Image: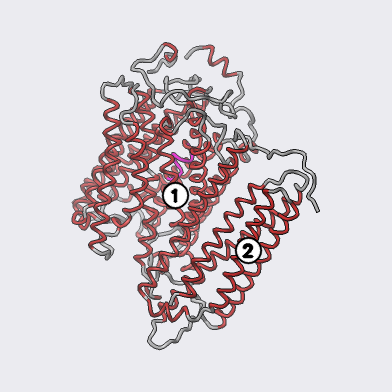
Amino acid sequence: MSATTSIEQRGSVNYLNCDYSLKSWLITLDHKRIGLLYLIAILIFFLIGGSMALLIRYELLTPQGDFLLSDTYNKTFTMHGVTLIFFFLIPSIPAVLGNFLLPLMLGAKDVAFPRLNLLSWYVFMAGAVLGTIALVSGGVDTGWTFYTPLSSTFAHGAVVLAVSAAFVAGFSSIMTGVNFIVTIHMMRAPGLTWSRLPLFVWAHYATSLIQVLGTPVIAITLFLVGVERVAKIGIFDPNLGGDPVLFQHLFWFYSHPAVYIMILPGMGVISEVIACFARRRIFGYDFVAYSSLAIAVLGFFVWGHHMFVSGQSMYAGMVFSVITFLVAIPSAIKIFNWTATLYKGSIHLAAPMLFALSFMGLFTIGGLTGLFLASMAMDIHLHDTYFVVAHFHYVMVGGQIIAFLAGIHFWWPKMTGRMYPEGMGKLSALVTFIGFNLTFMPQFILGYMGMPRRYHSYPEEWQVLHVLSSAGASILASGFILTIGYLIWSLWYGDKASANPWGAKGLEWQTPSPPPTENFATKPVVTEEAYHYTPELREEEKEYEHV
Amino acid sequence: MSDAHVSDTHLPVAHQFEDEDQQFKSYSLGMWVFLAQELLFFGGLFTAFIVYRHMYLDAFVAAHHKLDWTLGALNTTILLTSSLTMALGVRASIMNRWRATIGWLIATCVLAFGFMAVKYVEYSSKFEHHLWPGGDFQFNVEGVDAGGAQIFFGLYFVMTGLHGLHVLIGILIMAWLAVRVYRMRNQVTDYIPIELAGLYWHFVDLVWIFLFPMLYLVG
């Protein structure tokens, strides 16, 4: 990094130093500041949900259910799931990185609807407050899936508050989706055609489609659960002739696509990071772009694979099974194309790249074990066991959270104007990779041996595997805490970042770090495709010493 | 009678947009995407209705006879007329005639209130006849499963209730727009919000077009 850049930047006004007052943050319409507001909010929920995970793993150290009693244990894993899914994973990449980066990548001054964007944050926080009240006023013990009739008739605790929290947070997700779709359609800089869009943008377009078309269905479903509890209007209650399985259909119609809300944006991040640190054009751009859309569309037709043992017709099950297998094709296209991008690339193992490689391995395992569960005969054995738990943690944690970390490290200099400590970043990538695998690999074996999910006691012969898993969880937690620690440290003590520390392509790197409020001094014009990388850093790109 | 003289012929453009055209297309696309979301929102309920109608056909047929189709038809007429007045309002605003715009917006509001009034009459009679599924539900028709009828009325109240909520929101939006047009009467009418509200209102109308035959007519 040259000394001139930092002097130049110290004097410049950017989106962070233009106004320091709290009020300026709370009424900001700047997409970059709203992204940071989301980052702070989801960090809090990550810590809450993560602590619950540690409580669960601590309980499972011993075969007896002694540390958390049954009731408390049920509430703990429910709030673990509700918090981390609705208040961390779903907004994680779209609302933080997506908000921050989409307008920059498109060469726009802001998203299409800045006020709607701010409103989405307040709606999210309202949902979050409801969720917190549900947590402290007795909790919920239904599992994050809120299955009826348990949730509508039998469950104690604050079910209505918890479903309201998810309902309200859902609308914030819809607002983000509407905003992104319109922004991507309407706000592209001159010359930025669809085939020149960064793959991060394609991934967010696919994600937004799911947010807009899926979320309202879960909203109405949770609304009906609330109505059934409050007004005693039975829609799902078998006592009143209702059908609890209908709830499962409606719930998974959203919640399966929602799983792809929790992976597609991560895939977008990985495409950017891999291309940059392999210094190669992404292999098969069109295929990677359209595979995002394919995953989004297919995702709407696979919900029945959650219900193979719910008395669904066998023929319906076969159709759902086949379509589920089809999802493997676009997912595999991505993995293969990233691998092909690495081939003969000029690979730099910076921390974001290590996270990206970690993602590729973990997501492959998460995706392939999904195929085990998609075959009906296997699923009868594995349904509701730790195999399922391990499978979706490989996709959600090993996929989305690792991709989130890759993205946070990659764009940290852009967001904050500071470099994170590179050595620490590499250490964190390593520790989280080891900790994660140690936590969840034993759970595949446990599940295969028959350990059901959501139990706090188990036969003694499984203790070794549970101890391994708990040990892994503590390593994983240290990795996350380490990361949060040095990232916050770097806000004050990190090296000043230049505009483009990685020599990366993309419009976001052509404006200072951190960017000015209006993003670009002059309206950018795009003249080349995305990922126009050359194998070695060009002279003007050599400012970054760490690579 | 002519509307006030207008000096400036351009609408204000928000800071994130380059020009009026981009702004209009963005707002319009945003509204359509929002309506797609609304469609799925009601879609869940329509699915539930179809599933239960299939499960409890006899009960649903018997229960639908308890609804007064003449009131439903009256409401359909009112709502369709309000769509017309709304469309005329949008046209008036594009032609920059502020008095006519306000007039049509108020007419639409009045019709919407009429719709809610009829709904009130309908709801009250359902409560009187113990057809509110939450309280002491009573439904005695020979050979018909009362549980199925209870689900019918559960869905009836949830669906028409949510639709009614959309009508109320529409009234608030149109009243706000009328005030806004009056305040800005000496400038070019910003027709974009009125056009978007029009899209919303036609959608609310369209949901009713499906609700009416499904709940009141199909036997």
- Residue of label 2: B82
- Identity of the amino acid at label 2? Ser
Residue A93 lies in the magenta-colored region: yes
Identify the residue at image location x=77%, y=42%.
Answer: B6
Q: Residue A350: in sight, yes or no?
A: yes
Q: Is residue B171 above or below residue A264?
A: below
- Work out which residue is located at the far front of the displayed protein and give it: B1
Q: Nearer the viewer, mark 2 or mark 1?
A: 2
- Mark number, residue A86: 1
Question: Magenta part of the protein: which range?
Answer: A90-96
* Residue A335, x across and y down, in percent: 28, 35
Residue at coordinates 52% horizontally, 82% vertically from top-left? B130
Q: Secondary structure at mark 1?
A: helix
Residue A65 visible here: no
The local crowd at label 2, few if under 14, some if 14 to 19, many if 20 or more residues have their Cα within 10 Å, is many
Q: Please tell me which residue is depicted at 49% across the width and 24% down the height of the picture.
A: A418
Tell whether label 1 touches label 2 (CB within 8 Å).
Answer: no
Position of residue B190 measured from the top left corner of the image (x, y, whole percent): 68, 45
Q: Quadrant of residue A18?
A: top right
Left or right of A137? Residue A383 is: left
Which chain's residue wears label 1?
A: A
Q: Is residue A243 above or below residue B127?
A: above
